Image (cartoon, grey):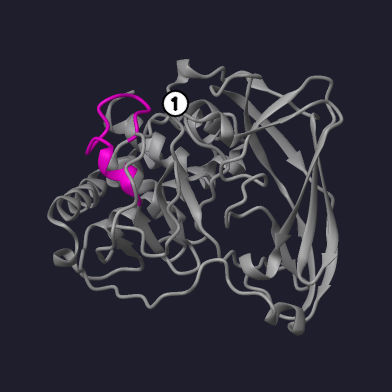
Amino acid sequence: MPSFTTVALVAALTRLVSAHPHHMNANVKRDNTLAVELSDAGAAGVGMKVTNIGSEPLNLLTYATLLDNGPVNKLKVVREDGSEVGFTGVLFNYDTASLPAEVFLALSPGESKDSLVDVASLYDIQGGTYTISASDVIEYAFMNSTSIEGVIPYASNELTVEITEDEISKHSPAIKPMALDKRTQVSSCSGAQGRALRAAIDYTVGLASNAATAASSGSTQKFQEYFRTTSANGRSTVANRFEAIAQEASSQTSGASAYHCTDVLDACSPGVIAYTSPAQNIIANCDIFYQLPAVSRGCGDQSQAATVLHEFTHAPGIFPPGTQDFAYGYSASTRLSAQQAINNADNYALYADAIDNNC
């Protein structure tokens, strides 16, 4: 089960609260307004051009998207045998309650944003041929606003690239590997932080267990609301993930993940609550985590326990494959496709809280 480690905390940040249904226009979804073009930039890099092909300006959220400058998952990288390459960066849980204007990118009609993705630093590649693509959604706000209004889906071209070992050797991992210690080190946390995280993990046992039961045999309508499907396979997958999370949280002496009290990978930045390195099954909290309430007492409210559950869904060692961060908050998360919803961390946290609070 998770281990605890003390590292100096970063400066205090604002509280994260997942969006309530009435905080966002859940019916707003702009299709066919965003084009993403990938190109071979050489040296194990991929060029990315994001273009507004619609008739109206767009105000796009950059957090955890292909517009984010951090070590986030932007691409799907596939080997010649069809297997997907592992992502070695970090999945961030961001503050979405009071988003600053600087985390949005405005694109006028016809305007583009170019960037370069360092594939060798973010993906577990070796010399060979790879097929690379990008397909996801981006949350957006109206112009001159920071309130999320909906999501924009996109799908890039498929790019085939040859990457050599020599090219790879010139790149360093975006997140450096660290030795895993699965033993609990509660004494190494500061008292208040250790108690808070330990209590949150304890509460997650019941939170996940009850959600597993509901996913397996509870309200079909409620499951459809959060996961966009009522198929037997979908309900089984979700229930099994919740059960695995409950099992992981039930022991603080053994398990698949290492959960740290503070920023052991030096990855915290303004607006980050917590993060997961899926390649290492490492989870760590940033300062905002300790400003959250211990548990949610409202529908869609963020909490320490819900954050722990959110992060546990990312760890493939707990239940493979780990989830992604396609969207945050109720309105954006429930606008995803069924496949995306079942693989989106916040859908699990939101559903578990909905069951816990009889929403």
Residue at the image position 39 percent from the left and 42 percent from the top: 216
* Quarter holding residue 80: bottom right
Residue at the image position 33 percent from the left and 42 percent from the top: 288
> Could you say where residue 55 lies in the image, as x and y percent from the top left?
84, 20
| Residue 291 is a magenta residue | yes
Q: Main secondary structure of the magenta part?
A: loop
Residue at the image position 26 percent from the left and 47 percent from the top: 204
Image quadrant where one finds the C terminus: top left
Q: Relative to the observer, which residue lies in front, 250 or 164?
A: 164
Instruction: Classify residue 319 as left or right of residue 231.
Output: left
Q: Secondary structure at mark 1?
A: loop
In this picture, is 65 found above or below 170?
Answer: above
Instruction: Classify residue 32 as left or right of residue 191.
Output: right
Residues drawn in magenta: 286-302
Q: Which residue is mark 1?
A: 19
> Could you say where residue 232 lies in the image, as x and y percent from the top left?
51, 43
> Could you say where residue 319 lies in the image, as x and y percent from the top left?
44, 60
Instruction: Classify residue 185 as left or right of residue 53.
Output: left
Image quadrant where one finds the N terminus: bottom left
Residue at the image position 34 percent from the left and 24 percent from the top: 299
In this picture, is 167 found above or below 336?
Answer: below
> Could you say where residue 150 lies in the image, as x and y percent from the top left?
61, 25
Q: Relative to the observer, which residue lies in front, 206 or 198?
A: 198
Instruction: Classify residue 84 as left or right of residue 110.
Output: left
| Disc 1 crowd, CA 10 A, few/some/many (<14, 14-19, 20+) | many
| Residue 22 is a magenta residue | no
Type of the residue with mark 1: Ala
- How many labels were placed on the picture? 1
* Quarter holding residue 247: bottom left
In this picture, is 226 found above or below 308?
Answer: above
